[in-house]
Image (cartoon, rainbow, N blue to C red):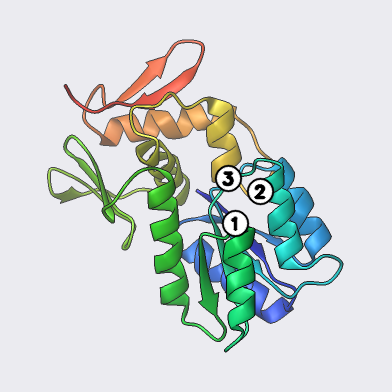
Amino acid sequence: MRILVVEDEPMLAAQLAEGVSAAGYVADIARNGADAHFMGDTEPYDAVVLDIGLPQMDGITVLKKWRAAGRTMPVLILTARDSWHEKVAGIDAGADDYLTKPFHMEELLARLRALIRRAGGHASTELVCGPLTLDTRSSRVSVNGRTLTLTGHEYRVLAYLIHHRDEVVSRGDLTEHIYAQDFDRDSNTVEVFIGRLRKKLPPELIETVRGLGYRLASPQ
């Protein structure tokens, strides 16, 4: 899953990206409103952390432009303490949630997990597909209660598939959602990760849909 972090304060931007990455997501950073608008308009993010006070273009304007263009990714806005008008303006512009500075990283990550779950139609923090369970809070993956050991890329591939359970996901979609913007992407490596996952998961859980991609299929 891929997150866009929009924050102009360098230290906070780095802390946010580090926290998001440690939680198993891929993080891209935009440090001004113009870059944020362009990145959110051209890249397929699963969620956005958006500061309101930005140079070049403020966060409310960025959000309004995204929504006007039909961009539906969940957006968590960051507002100043006691700035209730920013919270109202952000929600009216299309934000899905807000967090007041200063904040604890654990709360931000919990709110992000909730936004991503709701966007995929999932209510629980545990995503289940047959014998497979992925706990979004702990990034723990298990099969029939037995914990699996996965690499970072294997986890991100599996997390994206289970968030889109029973849907066909193309190699291109997987590539765009497991790598950061500046990473040298190679869709062929997705096949390698899928192959590794199949060795660790029950047979037939990950289906190949010929010519289209892959599907994590719920057992009948």
Disc 3 marks a residue whose amino acid type is Thr
Q: Quadrant of residue 172?
A: top right
For marks 3 and 1, give the one nearer the viewer.
1
Task: Quickly name the residue at label 2.
Answer: 67
Picture coordinates of residue 188 (x, y %)? Answer: 58, 27
Q: Is residue 74 left or right of residue 141?
A: right
User: From mark 2 to mark 1, how far is it between C-alphas?
Assistant: 7 Å
| Residue 19 in the image: above or below residue 75 | below
Disc 2 marks a residue whose amino acid type is Arg
Do labels 2 and 1 touch, CB within 8 Å? yes
Task: Quickly name the residue at label 3.
Answer: 72
Picture coordinates of residue 53 (x, y %)? Answer: 74, 75
Q: Quadrant of residue 194?
A: top left
Q: Nearer the viewer, residue 141 or 217?
A: 217
Q: Residue furthest top?
A: 210
Q: Secondary structure at mark 3?
A: loop
